[in-house]
Amino acid sequence: MSDEITFDNKGSHGLFIFSENIGLEEEELLTAVLEAGKISGCDKFIFDLRNTINIDTKFYRTFTTFSNSIDATIATINLGKTLKKELIDAGLENVFNPVGTYSNAIATLGLVSSKSQSQALDVEFLNPFIKATIDTFGVQANTEIVLGKPFVKESKINLPMDIAGIIGITSIKFSGNLALCFSSDIFLKIYSNMLGGEKFEKIDDEIEDAAGEFTNIILGQAKASLNDKKGYQIDKAIPSVIRGKGITLNHLSATASIVVPFIVEEDEFYLDICFDENSN
């Protein structure tokens, strides 16, 4: 569980991540972090309460004051059922605006782009990657995942992630890459499922290799389908892994990317695909 309250200016929006219990001992930190958000210049904010079990009722007024003092839109993600009920019963639904997941939040905040690349990445191209992802986690990691709603991600939008498996996609028609992006919590949950329920507290060098393996398997399965049916002639590639708290992913492609969210219980991870068409 997180023992901190943090604010991060993501450019297109501000992201608050809250601790397990927002109690009296966090009063000074909570006030300072909310003030940092207030002066950040952001006009859209996401409250991430994935770690939060309890908010002392004393701070309901603090959040209301913050909401009323800014000309901005707020969306709250990963809100547990018990805490959500408490906030609604306290009349704070309009203050927190619970929307579910990160992908719901960026849609609510108007950060989702219009079509651009979604027209290039047609359904027939995207579906093999979706099927391969669902099959890979079902078979390899004993984890049932549910497809979310794909969206176009401009470079200014940063996905919430701590580890990503990345692999190049090279074809006679285009070049680009595929990234599989996870928060630490959801990656460790999936890794635990893969090993029969054994619990892990943090991602180490051995565990991180699984992100690359998942990415490699997904591309391999999708490549086989696309090469056979569509003649894309996608080449083999070697995956890499990046990890670190709150890392960002900067594609080399000049265009936006398509993000496909996959939901595990009340959390989600992302398949992020981008490419540039070859000129020849």
Image: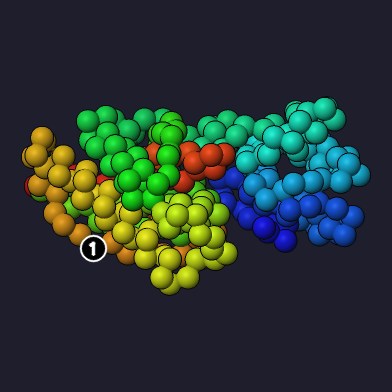
Residue 158 % position (x, y): 50, 50
Q: Residue at x 9, y 39 (%)?
A: 228
Residue furthest to the front in view is 196
On screen, residue 22 versus residue 125, left or right, reads right
On screen, residue 189 versus residue 258, left or right, reads right
Q: Residue at x 81, y 51 (%)?
A: 22
Dividing the picture into quadrants, the one containing residue 82 is top right
Q: Is residue 19 above or below residue 149?
A: below
Residue hosting label 1:
238
Residue furthest to the bottom in view is 205
Q: Amino acid at mark 1?
A: Ile
Q: Residue at x 47, y 70 (%)?
A: 204
| Residue 162 makes an appearance in the image | no
Q: Is residue 84 above or below residue 254?
A: above
Residue 43 % position (x, y): 66, 40
Depth order, front residue of 213/167: 213
Depth order, front residue of 124/220: 220
- Say which element carries label 1: loop
Q: Residue at x 22, y 30 (%)?
A: 124
Residue 214 % position (x, y): 33, 54
Residue 210 % position (x, y): 37, 61
Depth order, front residue of 103/210: 210
Say few, some or many: other residues with alpha carbon within 10 Å of mark 1 (under 14 / 14 to 19 / 20 or more).
Answer: few
